[in-house]
Amino acid sequence: MNSTQWLKKTSIILLLILLTILLVNYIIDPYGIYNSNFFKFQKITQSEKMRFIKPLIVQNIKPKSIVLGTSRAEHGYSTDHKYFKKPTYNFGLTSASMYEATSNLKYAIKQGRLEQVLLVLDYRMFNDKNQKQVKDFEHYFDGSRGKYYYLYSLDTFKDTLRTIFKTYKPFFLYHKNGSIVHEFEMKKLKKLGSQLLSMSGYERNYYKLLKKEYIYKDTKKSSFKDFEELLELCYKNDIELDIIFGPSHIRQWEALAYYLGEETFSNWKRDIVKEVEKVAKKLHKKPYKIIDFAIYHKLTSEKMPSDKNQTMQYYYDSSHYNQKLGNLVLNSLIDKNRIKGFGVEISSKNIEQHLKHQKDIKKEFIDVSCYREEVFN
């Protein structure tokens, strides 16, 4: 065999290998971005790739409404609820910073028909160690990586094989609407054996390394600048925006108080109110609604089951709540079957009264010394 023949055969073999990789990646569709639907494999490798998967899906469905936030938003809010304008997509991201949430908003606006946003705020979005969780985050929005880019990827092929042979343990499983699969989370919780141990471990570490300065630890840039940009984008594009402090369990806020001080959480709420009203005044607009569900209430202080084989009705852990509780939040936002005292609209006019009331009733819901003894000693 001469060199020309060898080169031809080698080229043909390499081309066939490339075409095989491309075809198998498309048929198996490990990230759920091609809607090929040849097989019903669980998309187990999605959980580590949602930062590029979600923009591709948003580009495809061009939603009228989106959810923004962290994994709390991904867990808690079903896009099927009447609150949302359809089509809807849960554009939350695990450990999302304010910068990432604002980038997601820009991209959703770019699709041309966004009308409504639910922003579920998390203290960590403003104080995360990273401004963005992956280095090439911006490439997911600049058009350089369309969905077919991933067909030629060896990483995609590895994930295709993991999907076929189930050799990958996902952190989360996702619905097509961008929210996290409840049943999968319940299976994980039952495997742990004790919800109390799960919650306590989470609380011991969640706020341990966070600061109070509203800056990203890596870039030293202001997270409130990103929040300001998000607000301005919504105003300038006539988007209906509801801003909420989500109903994580009150144990979560006690963990924050332990590491960052009793007033930190209240000061953050004050600062959010000030920023919203400042931007509204600058643009001659009515301030967006801010509703506080991170309050002392019978729902947010749900008791731990005494039987270790039982799980809580509304919570996976102190931070993450399920769509049962999320639906009660959404009901409240549309004044449907509203539960008394659950969700308080706040502004500069009532914020101090509201925060004082929360301090006054705190002891009715939690014994702080007992909590700290249980979790931190």
Image (cartoon, helix red, strand yellow):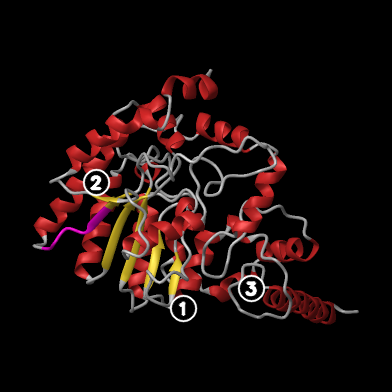
Q: Which mark is residue 272?
A: 2
Rate crowding at label 2 as few (under 14), some (14 to 19) or many (20 or more) other CA atoms within 10 Å: some
Left-right relation of 256 to 360: right
Q: Quadrant of residue 264?
A: top left
Asked if the residues shown at circle 2 and circle 1 are in contact, with their CB atoms under 8 angstroms apart, the answer is: no
Which residue extends farthest right?
A: 1
Between marks 2 and 3, how big is the CA–CA gap? Answer: 42 Å
Between marks 2 and 1, how big is the CA–CA gap? Answer: 31 Å
Left-right relation of 98 to 311: left
Q: Nearer the viewer, mark 2 or mark 1?
A: 2
- Residue at numbered disc 1: 61
- Residue at numbered disc 3: 151
Name the amino acid type tagged 2.
Ile
The x and y percentages for residue 20 are 76, 77
Going from the N terminus, do you reach mark 1 or mark 3 first?
1
- Residue at left offset 31%, top offset 32%: 361
Image height of 295 relative to 368, above or below: below
Quadrant in which the N terminus appears? bottom right
Going from the N terminus, do you reach mark 2 or mark 3 first?
3
Between marks 1 and 3, how big is the CA–CA gap? Answer: 20 Å
289 inside magenta stretch: yes
In the image, the segment drawn in magenta is: 285-290
The x and y percentages for residue 224 are 26, 46
Image height of 145 relative to 225, above or below: below
The x and y percentages for residue 211 are 36, 32
